Every structure is written in structure tokens, then in C-alpha cells.
Image (cartoon, rainbow, N blue to C red):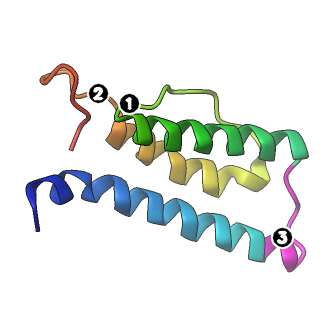
Amino acid sequence: MSRRASAWWPAIVALDEVADTATATRVAIGHGAPAPSPDAVNQLTAALYDIADAIDAGVPPRAGELPDDEALKPVTDAVRPVLSVLEPDRSRPGQVRS
């Protein structure tokens, strides 16, 4: 595995967990679990777009507010490690943690 790929590996794994958790949450809602509020969904969607935009720009994502909606808790809990992995590495200015 290349050095660049191995540096991104923790973020890829964390993002995969977000996708898996979002899918499981949607399936649970389809089976009767409480649905999140539309505002919470919009807030989470905006946060995920911010993360994607930051990755595209090669900069750390800003740590925005994640929704406090019990129905989305598994997904927001999965997003936090993504933010942690992509936060700036204070020992190497201008670099994200790898």
C-alpha cells in the first residue's frame, strides 16, 4: 500500500462506518424505529457535505455542530471519528492526522 493510501486509510474506514451506520439507521426506521426530524437530517447532511468539501479541498473539515437527535445518534456517533481523524495534526502544521 502506498504511503498516501495508508495515510488516508483511517479516514476511509471511518467514512465506511458512517455509510454502514446510516444504512442501518434507515433500515431501522423502515421497520418502525423513530424517524429523525427533518431539521436534524438537514443539519447532518450539511455536516457531511462540509466534510466532503474539505476532503476535496485538501483541508481539515471545520468542526460544525452535529444534530442532537436521538434517532440519528448512531450516525452522529460514527461521524465524530471521521472528524477526529481529519483534524489538523498539531505536530505537523498544515497536515491532517494520519
Identity of the residue drawn at 53% across and 48% down: 79
Using residue 17 as the reference point, say whether residue 21 is left or right of it: right
Question: Which span of residues is magenta-colored?
Answer: 28-36
Q: Which residue is mark 3?
A: 29
Q: Position of residue 83 (x, y in %)?
A: 44, 39
Q: Which mark is residue 88?
A: 2
Front in this rendered view, residue 79 or 55: 55
- Crowdedness near tag 3: few (<14), some (14–19) or many (≥20) residues, C-alpha within 10 Å: some
> Between residues 36 and 49, which one lies in front from this camera angle?
49
Residue occupying the point 20% across, 21% down: 90
Q: What amino acid type should be assigned to the residue bearing mark 2?
A: Pro
Q: In the rendered image, which residue does mark 1 sit on?
A: 60
Percent x, y of residue 87: 34, 32
Q: Amino acid at mark 1?
A: Pro
CA gap between label 1 and label 2 equals 6 Å
Q: Are marks 1 and 2 in contact (CB under 8 Å)?
A: yes
- The answer to whether 17 is drawn above or below residue 83 in the figure is below
> How many angstroms separate mark 3 from mark 1 (CA)?
32 Å
Disc 2 residue crowd, few under 14, some 14–19, many 20+, Cα 10 Å: some
Instruction: Please tell me whether residue 81 is drawn above or below residue 33 in the rendered image.
Output: above
Mark 2 or 3: the one toward you = 2
Label 2 – label 3 distance at C-alpha: 35 Å
Sequence order check, earlier mark of 2 and 3: 3
Q: Is residue 81 magenta?
A: no
